[in-house]
Structure formats: C-alpha cells, structure tokens
Image: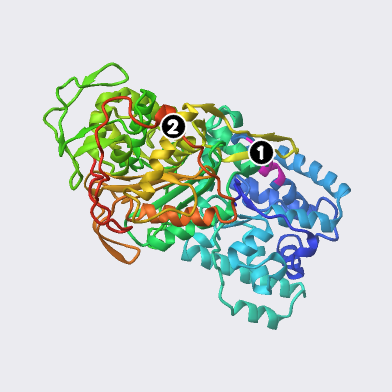
C-alpha cells in the first residue's frame, strides 16, 4: 500500500533504459567511457583542479566509473562526517576513489558500470536513478525516454540542485539550457544530426512533476499507512532513538504485512462517500476492528490525506489518536453510556432493574461523585436535561434504547463514577490527545474526545464476549536479510463473558426499539449505540456483530464547539441537526452490510436468563416507550450531553 524511503529510487536493468539515454549521459559526462580504463587521466586532472579551486566538489568525478564510486560512498554514508568525507576536495579522497574505481572496472563490464551509475545518480526533484527521474520529470518509464527528455536528464546530473525544476522558473530555465548543451555535444560527437539537435531544442522542457510515490500521501489507504508509520516510529524495538527508528523505516529494507482487508476498506470508503463529500466542512471517519484479535480491518475518512487544502486534503490522521498521527478527536457523546451500563451489570443489576429519571438532573451535592483518585465532585447548580427526552421509570434496557441522559446520570450516581471510568479504561478507552480521561459527573455523557479506532476497539471487546485485544495493524515484518518477525494479538479478559453478552443484548435493542430503529438493522445479529454531543457538536455511532466492530464519527475539524452540526449541508443535503442516527448510523449500516458480504452470519451468545433477566430490586410496570418519529435523518433530541 505504500513505500517508505530516504531517497526515491527505482532500479531497472540495462535493457530497460532507452539507448538514447545511455548515449546522452556518456556524451556529456564521459565521452571516452568505453575507450579508457578506470582512470581518464585528462578528465581527472581537469576535475581535480576545479574542485581544489572551489574548495569542494564542484565538478563530477571525471570518469563515469569514478562518479559511480563517489555516489556509492555518499549513499552509504551513515553520518555527516562520512558524507563530508565523500565530498571532500582532497588528494586523499581522490586517490581512494581511484583505488575503488580500479576494482570496479576489474569486476564489472562497461555496460554493467553504466547501468549501476544510471541507477544511483541523483537527477533532482527528489528523484534518484534514471527510472525514478523519468517518471518524476516526464511521467514515462526510462525505456521510453525521447531524445529531448534523455538530454534533459543527462544535463541534470552535473548540478541537480541548481537545475531542480521543482524549485521554480529560474531553475527550469537552467535545466533547459543544460539540455541544449547536451544536445549540442551529442551533435558534435556525431551521435545525432544537427537537424535532430535543433528539433529537440525547439521543444518545451515538458516537466510534469509527477507526485513522488513514497510515503502515505499517494497511498490508496493513506490513513492506514499513517497508522503503520507511527507504529514503527513509536516502537523502541526499531531503534533506541526517534532518528534511528526513522532511518530503519526509510532505509531498513523492511517488508511490513498489515491487517487491512481491502474489501472491508472499500465498503467503508463507499459508505462514507455516499453520505459525506470531501468538500464538506464536517468530516466523517470510520474504523473497522475484528473482535477477538484487535486487528484493524479498515480506516476511512471523507477527506483525502495531504497538504493541499485547495483539494480538500487534511494533513493528519482523522481516524486515529495523536500517537498514530491523529488530532484531538471529537467528544464521543452517548457512546460512553455503554460503560455505565456495563458498570451497572457488574454491580449485580438485572436488565429490568430501573430507576426514575426526571426531566432534569442535578447532583444532590458537591461531593455526590467520587473520582478514581478519591476526589469528591458534583455540581448541584448545573442541570442535565433530556431536551426532548422522556422522563419516567426506565430500566437498563429502555433507558439505553432511548439514550436518556437523566437516567444515565442517576445510574452513574448509583453505580459510581469511578466504576464507569474503570470499565472504560479496561476496554482500552483513552483520550485521543493522549491526556488522562476527564473524570466529571458527566463522564457517562461522553465529554472526552475520542478517535474511531479506540471506540471501535472498545466495542469489539464486547462483541468478543469481554476479550479485549490491543489494536493491531501489523502481522509480520521481514527485514532485508529475510528474517521474519510475526506479531500476534495481545488480548486479555476485560469483562465477564456473561456481562458482555447481556450488554450486547441490550445494545441490540438500540437498532430495533431505540434511537437507531429508523435506520434499521443489517440482516444479522448486530448491536450498537448512538452518540450525539451537547448542542450537536459531534455525532457518533459505534456498533458490532460477533465478527466485526466499527465506529463512525462526524464533526468539524475547524473546531467542533465553534462549528456545530446545526443547519449544515453535508453530502449535498441540508440537515437541521445531525445526531448519531442521522449520518453516522447509516454510514455504519452500509459499511457493515458491504464489509460482511459473503461472511456467514454469527449469532450473539444468548444471555444467562437466570442471572440477568427480571429484576433484583423493586420492579415497576414498564410500558413500552413511545418515541417521536425517528428516521435516519431526524433523530429525536434526547441525546444531548454536556
């Protein structure tokens, strides 16, 4: 999916290089190349005199063989001192070069030396080797270079920085002038006619500036690529310092196998593009994770990755946390209510246990809640509301289905703030910006900023019956010597399997009886939770089947609190407000249907009825809740969180 390198180079065989290119480079750099041995005495004396006069290497190292030797020494230099030694204008360096050149001439034929030289020479514009240069400059292979193109590249090797066409008009004019010098020289040596030289000089430079293929920007899967890159750069196993790890990535000759599933990636890409345009200010992003392994199967976003804002590109990883090249993320909203639900089940509550939820909630006192550090908190002056929610008696099921804020505030008060926080952490929840989770009484309403990979992975643990696996993107790395290291899932039992099953049972009702019922299911067992933040600053949906989990977020990267999802046009359609079931839910649904195409349906494990059905405390009759009309584009406003 991508290539990392310190130098963009593509090595090709001698027969893959156009004859006119070979002729041009020999004509301008070493016209007696096929006649002399390792040393061209006339050329060596001339070059040495000019270099000593300049105090540095200002002219190529005489013969092509000597230039090749110098390029090898320069390329293999690992330190600044070694690089300076390779460029030093001294008799000692020259003698050393000549010694190596004699060895090269004994070992290789002239054609082999010319091939090696053309594959190592720097042509400018970040292109090393004639194949890379042909693609970068003209968008063609080295074997298809024309006379003016070959003359241009041959002219560039003398001083590639001075003639780098990427650096502006003056540099391009210098390159064109050098091209004409090469053409004149070829005509002077009888390699082309004067008429051919004149015709070639009459053509435009023709520089195309084809994008360099390395790194993540040109990758088909740029966000996954960024994740992999940071995995290597953050891992001390690949070097004791950041510089050493970067060098290993760029020059280590590693072949990295990943967990991406191209079919699932395509499903996510298509679903997002269906609902959100790259030109929209709000951005949608999605991550797919395999339960039971933590393998990341896809990472998608509505904006392309890159630095060109005119092309609606964005310069960081929208799908991941800051440690993997991402930003601060978006508040996760009501997707965090699931952790309080789990906390209640861990405390022994049954699915029909409930409590009375009012139209508003205020903490009874300033010490109502206790953080995991033992700090007493609470704000009796602040009222949490349901907006258009429905107060009354709610069970764990109905309170979750309706995503009733006041119910979950009461439930968190009963279960304990620290229990909700601890449960979330056990499922891998941590803030996208790397800071510690904010522990306030509204924790259950999703006040912490998250990224889709982290949220999807937490929900994947529920799907895996409580088995949490760290997010995994690399399966095997093979080094340049062929030694392979295989990476396996790192898993632990985070939840009691029975509690995970009961949680999945409750979340199944969100799709059939709750905030997602207007969007509907996916034709197989599935569960999930909508999430909408205070005043529609961001919207989420996180859901799963036993085989796959996914989380979708949408928010405005310019600033979610300043640019809320109210009165916005997204994907060419106007929305009065965007909630969890408005866009994230449909994106999730379409993704899952496409991603699981051809995968046999797997059913959730039935809950332990004796343990979880009924109620352990006073059961009140719970009439089936009556919600306002809900559709995929007009979710009721009981998702408000603070």
Q: Which mark is residue 609?
A: 2
How many residues crowd mark 1 within 10 Å: few (<14), some (14–19), many (20+)? some
Q: Which residue is mark 1?
A: 477
Q: Is residue 353 left or right of residue 248?
A: left
- Magenta region, residue range: 72-78
Which residue is found at the position 32% from the left and 57% from the top? 281
Quadrant where the C terminus is found in the figure: top left
Which residue is found at the position 63% from the left and 39% from the top? 475
The mark total stands at: 2
Query: Is 465 above or below relative to 553?
Result: above
Q: Position of residue 402 (x, y in %)?
A: 28, 44
Q: Quadrant of residue 443?
A: top left
Q: Quadrant of residue 353?
A: top left
Q: Position of residue 22 (x, y in %)?
A: 75, 65
Of callouts 2 and 1, which one flags the residue occurring earlier in the amino acid sequence?
Answer: 1
Query: Is 152 above or below relative to 561?
Result: below
Q: Position of residue 60 (x, y in %)?
A: 68, 53
Which residue is found at the position 27% from the left and 57% from the top? 634
Q: Is residue 537 left or right of residue 504?
A: left
Query: Could you say which is closer to the camera, residue 353 or residue 144?
Result: 353
* Residue 97 visible somewhere in the drawing: yes
Q: Is residue 36 left or right of residue 192?
A: right
Verify whether residue 616 appears in magenta: no
- Hey, which residue is sitting farthest bottom in the picture? 195
Q: Position of residue 622 (x, y in %)?
A: 26, 39
- Hey, which residue is sitting farthest top in the picture? 374
Secondary structure, mark 1, is: strand
Q: Quadrant of residue 98?
A: top right
């Amino acid at each position: 999916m991508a290539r990392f390198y310190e130098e963009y180079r593509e090595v090709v065989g001698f027969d893959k290089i156009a004859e006119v290119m070979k002729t041009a480079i020999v004509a301008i750099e070493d016209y007696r190349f096929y006649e002399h041995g390792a040393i061209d005495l006339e050329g060596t004396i001339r070059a040495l005199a000019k270099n000593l006069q300049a105090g540095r290497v200002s002219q190529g190292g005489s013969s092509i063989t000597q230039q090749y030797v110098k390029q090898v020494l320069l390329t293999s230099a690992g330190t600044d001192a070694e690089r300076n030694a390779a460029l030093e204008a001294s008799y000692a360096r020259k003698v050393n070069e000549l010694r190596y050149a004699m060895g090269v001439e004994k070992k290789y034929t002239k054609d082999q030396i010319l091939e090696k030289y053309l594959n190592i020479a720097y042509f400018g514009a970040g292109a090393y080797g004639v194949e890379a240069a042909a693609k970068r400059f003209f968008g063609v292979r080295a074997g298809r270079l024309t006379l003016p193109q070959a003359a241009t590249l041959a002219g560039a090797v003398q001083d590639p920085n001075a003639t780098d066409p990427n650096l502006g008009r003056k540099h391009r004019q210098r390159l064109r002038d050098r091209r004409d010098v090469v053409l004149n020289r070829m005509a002077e040596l009888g390699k082309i006619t004067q008429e051919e030289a004149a015709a070639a000089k009459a053509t435009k430079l023709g520089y195309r500036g084809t994008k360099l293929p390395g790194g993540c920007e040109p990758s088909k899967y740029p966000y996954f690529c960024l994740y992999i890159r940071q995995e290597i750069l953050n891992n001390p196993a690949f070097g004791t310092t950041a510089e050493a790890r970067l060098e290993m990535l760029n020059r280590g000759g590693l072949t990295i196998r990943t967990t991406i599933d191209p079919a699932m990636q395509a499903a996510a890409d298509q679903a997002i593009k269906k609902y959100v345009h790259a030109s929209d200010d709000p951005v949608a992003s999605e991550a797919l994770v395999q339960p039971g392994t933590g393998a990341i199967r896809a990472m998608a976003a509505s904006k392309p990755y890159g630095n060109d804002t005119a092309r609606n590109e964005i310069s960081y990883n929208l799908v991941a946390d800051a440690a993997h090249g991402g930003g601060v993320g978006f508040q996760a909203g009501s997707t965090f209510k699931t952790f309080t639900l789990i906390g209640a089940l861990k405390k022994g509550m049954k699915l029909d246990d409930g409590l009375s939820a009012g139209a508003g909630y205020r903490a009874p006192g300033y010490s109502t809640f206790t953080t995991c550090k033992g700090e007493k908190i609470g704000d009796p002056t602040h009222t949490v509301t349901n907006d258009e929610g429905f107060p009354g008696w709610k069970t764990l099921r109905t309170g979750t289905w309706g995503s009733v804020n006041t119910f979950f505030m009461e439930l968190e008060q009963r279960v304990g703030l620290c229990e909700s926080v601890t449960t979330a952490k056990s499922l891998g929840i941590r803030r996208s910006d790397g800071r510690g989770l904010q522990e306030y009484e509204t924790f259950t309403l999703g006040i912490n900023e998250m990224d889709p990979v982290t949220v999807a992975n937490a929900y994947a643990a529920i799907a895996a019956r409580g088995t949490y696996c760290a997010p995994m993107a690399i399966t095997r790395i093979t080094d340049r010597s062929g030694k392979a290291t295989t990476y396996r899932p790192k898993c632990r039992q985070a939840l009691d399997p029975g509690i995970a099953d009961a949680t999945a049972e409750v979340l199944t009702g969100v799709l059939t009886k709750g905030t997602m019922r207007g969007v509907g299911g996916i034709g197989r067992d599935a569960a999930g939770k909508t999430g909408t933040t205070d005043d529609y600053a961001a919207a989420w949906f996180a859901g799963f089947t036993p085989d796959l989990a996914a989380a979708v977020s949408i928010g405005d990267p310019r600033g979610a609190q300043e640019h809320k999802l109210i009165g916005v046009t997204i994907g060419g359609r106007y929305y009065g407000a965007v909630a969890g079931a408005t866009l994230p839910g449909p994106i999730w649904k379409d993704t899952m249907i496409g991603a699981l195409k051809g995968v046999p349906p797997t059913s959730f494990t039935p809950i332990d009825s004796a343990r979880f059905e009924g109620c352990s405390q006073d059961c009140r009759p719970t009439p089936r809740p009556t919600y306002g009309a809900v559709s995929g584009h007009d979710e009721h406003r009981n998702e408000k969180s603070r």
